[in-house]
Amino acid sequence: MEHIDEHHVNQLKKEKKLLYTSFFLAALFVSFIWLLWLADFLFSLNLAQYGVHPRDLIGLRGILFMPYIHGNLQHILSNTIPALILGTVLFNIYPRVAFWTIIIIQVFSGIMVWLIGAPFSYHIGASAVIFGIASFLFFSGFFRKDRQSVAISFFVGLLYGGSMLIGMMPVQRGVSWEGHLSGAIAGFLCALFFKNVDLPKIEEPIDELIDDEDTPFFERENKEDYIK
């Protein structure tokens, strides 16, 4: 029984450490975009020019910079909480594929926005990546079908499903629905591609941790094996 308790204590410590690390990484990203926004606001850096500019060669640089640049205060505020929540969930539940998922979503959505985005405009903001992460978490529940992934899928759908559907439609002026849609598609593809990675570990049954020699004779299944 002591062995079982120690195993569970160590497991809880690992999960707690992973949760803290996941939150730290998400908070680091949020802090970085806030620092950039403050620098842009205070020193009039005009960082929007480094966003994705569709069908313009120099606009391709926005693939690297788009998620980290924001316009007004409302823009960055609307992305802060979702980035913090979804980023923490992503790194905590799927730590082995989290970075790759974000990179793929950023590159894919950036390229798609450059190809199909509204011309004569700069596309900026972390929304494409946020939509991609939400899409990844949502569809992972369908592809993996384990309880943890399904629960996360339900949580994301309940919390962000409505806003995601609206965000992917060209109904709000000044909002890059192309980025939202591209991010969501990238998240779906990542969920499909990584469906067999970071699967939850199957807990070892408690019965297997108990030596049969310690089990009372009358509770043993094959009593005849012990009768000489």
Image (cartoon, grey):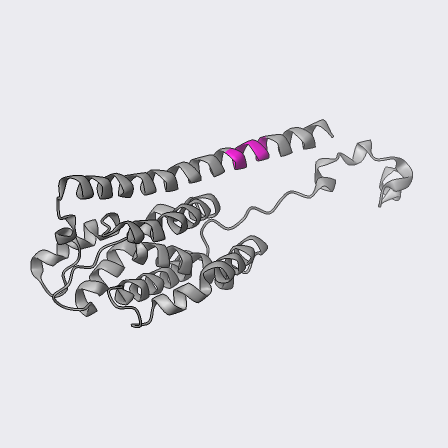
Vertical comparison of 164 with 47: above or below: below
Identify the residue shown where x is 32% and y is 39%.
31
Q: Quadrant of residue 53?
A: bottom left
x, y (%) of residue 169?
33, 72
Q: How many marks?
A: 0
Q: Nearer the viewer, residue 218 or 64?
A: 64
Relative to residue 82, is residue 125 drawn left or right?
left
Q: Quadrant of residue 57?
A: bottom left
Q: Main secondary structure of the magenta part?
A: helix
Observer able to see residue 161: yes
Observer able to see residue 228: no
Task: Read off the magenta span.
Answer: 10-16
| In magenta stretch: residue 13 | yes
Vertical comparison of 176 with 89: above or below: below
x, y (%) of residue 99?
34, 46
| In magenta stretch: residue 199 | no
Relative to residue 98, is residue 156 drawn left or right?
right
Q: Nearer the viewer, residue 149 or 47?
A: 47
Vertical comparison of 224 with 114: above or below: above
Relative to residue 146, is residue 196 drawn left or right?
left
